[in-house]
Amino acid sequence: ESAQQIAKEIAQVGNQIQVTKDFEGIEQIVATGFYDEKFATAENQDVEAELLELHNFNPKEIKTAISPELRLCLDTHAEYAKNNHGIVEEILQKHDREGERCKVAMFHGNEVNWEAVVFINWALSKIFQVRDELGTPSWIKHIPVGVEITSSTLAKSYTCLPDGRTYQAGCVMTEVASMRIDYLDEFGFRHSSYSCQFHPELTESLRDARFEMPPKFNDLRQHHGQQMLAHFLQDKLMNQVKSTAPTTQVAAPQS
């Protein structure tokens, strides 16, 4: 495929994708097409403001209808996630092995829409095909090669909202609690950045640290959010070191 064909295909698919929210089986369409101002972010079903467990993103838990275009993007995301891993997945696996859940502070009313993330990942996989073609603009090599949803949150209890809408305990509340954005350098080594809907820096109180007694160091070391933040920083430092002598490469995106 030529770059122009790929650009046309990306636009066609992006214009067909709808963002929907589910309330007890009742779907609400909040955005249609990637030009919609609510395509990337929109109001969540409810405000999350407490410590919540992180779970792996599981497309099987999605209750809304999935169009053929969205299924294409979702399958591409699943394949990419199977071949590429990062800090959040490793931490969740560690907690699972130890028989506990990773709990972090959520403090938000809006969310990144999972439909937008899987579409972007699919679009990046298409762009990757022409990354090294003669005549491709040099800036193409500096954009991400993939983006993966790395964690989600579930509703803790049955809730009836003021407008009468409801949702059950255990339903997916924030599909994109975190995501990993991958880049390739000129050596083929992967560098990752992380975006979190949760606040790893906040403790259970969710209070501004300027108005709270500092926690004891040993208590802070046990805080899952702080542990994750430390791993993010460590990963960044290690990437800077490894980029001079890469030993692994990112798996090629599948379109």
Image: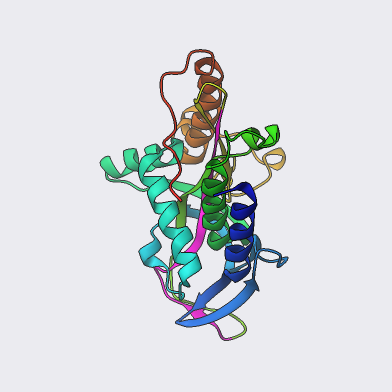
Residue 40 is situated, as x and y percent measured from the top left of the image, at: 65, 60
Write down the quadrant of residue 24 in the picture.
Answer: bottom left
- Residue depicted at 59% across the width and 53% down the height: 6
Q: Is residue 86 left or right of residue 184?
A: left
Q: Is residue 167 magenta?
A: yes
Q: Is residue 171 above or below residue 93?
A: below
Would you say the magenta stretch is mainly helix, strand or loop?
strand
Q: How is the image coloured?
A: rainbow
One can see residue 97 in this view: yes
Note whether 227 is above or below 27 in the view shown: above
Q: Is residue 210 magenta?
A: no
Q: Residue at x 44, y 33 (%)?
A: 250
Of 72 and 209, which appears nearest the observer?
A: 72
Q: Residue at x 39, y 53 (%)?
A: 78
Residue in view at x 50 percent, y 25 percent: 188
Query: What's drawn in magenta, residue-wise?
Result: 164-184
Look at the image and tell me whether residue 53 can be seen.
Answer: no
Task: Pick the residue in front: 226 or 73.
Answer: 73
Q: Residue furthest toward the top?
A: 245
Q: Quadrant of residue 61?
A: bottom left
